Image (cartoon, helix red, strand yellow):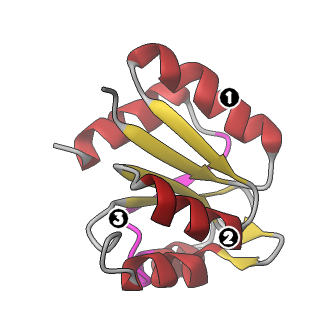
């Protein structure tokens, strides 16, 4: 069975792009469009990694990252934060301080995302 990635991003084109590029490599890609839906999906699917957008319609990614890390069943799941708008050093530090293991700026190359995910799961 493939590894599971949960993509929490309100942009359906990002979710579709990630899914279309990673599923042929054996990933099972789950999706959520809001932070709350992402937390619920993470609890029910037990992903191996989470791709979390900084800007979500119901809050900011770092707050959801903190909540994910507070869940005993999810505390060890690596969270990779992404953003196309929150790209200043302070934003990146905020995401990392709340538990993200890395920060990727949109637009990003799918090969870079795939390599980062592989590195996170080693």
Image quadrant where residue 20 sits: top right
Q: Is residue 36 above or below residue 1?
A: below
**Cα gap from disc 2 to disc 1, whole angstroms:** 19 Å
**Cα gap from disc 2 to disc 3, whole angstroms:** 18 Å
Helix, strand or loop for disc 3: loop
Q: Which residue is mark 3?
A: 101
Quarter of the picture holding the C terminus:
top left
Q: Is 85 in front, or is 113?
A: 113
Q: Is residue 32 left or right of residue 1?
A: right
**Cα gap from disc 3 to disc 1, whole angstroms:** 22 Å
Q: Position of residue 110 (x, y in %)?
A: 53, 28
Q: Is 54 in front, or is 8?
A: 8
The residue at 68%/73% (across/down) is 36
- Whether 108 is among the magenta residues is no
Q: Which residue is mark 2?
A: 35
Tag on residue 17?
Answer: 1
**Crowding near pointer 1: few (<14 within 10 Å), some, many (20+)?**
few
Please provide the residue range marked out in magenta: 96-107
Q: Is 112 in front, or is 55?
A: 55
The residue at 42%/28% (across/down) is 27
Q: Residue most toward the left?
A: 122
Q: Is residue 54 above or below residue 27?
A: below
């Amino acid at each position: 069975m493939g590894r599971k990635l949960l993509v929490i991003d309100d942009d359906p084109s990002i979710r579709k792009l990630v899914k279309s590029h990673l599923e042929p490599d054996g990933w099972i890609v789950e999706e959520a469009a809001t932070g709350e839906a992402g937390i619920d999906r993470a609890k029910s699917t037990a992903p191996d990694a989470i791709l979390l957008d900084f800007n979500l319609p119901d809050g900011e990614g770092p707050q959801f990252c903190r909540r994910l890390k507070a869940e005993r069943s999810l505390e060890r799941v690596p969270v990779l934060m992404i953003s196309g708008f929150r790209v200043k050093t302070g934003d990146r530090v905020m995401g990392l301080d709340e538990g993200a293991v890395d920060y990727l700026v949109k637009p990003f190359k799918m090969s870079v995302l795939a390599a980062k995910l592989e590195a996170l799961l080693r």
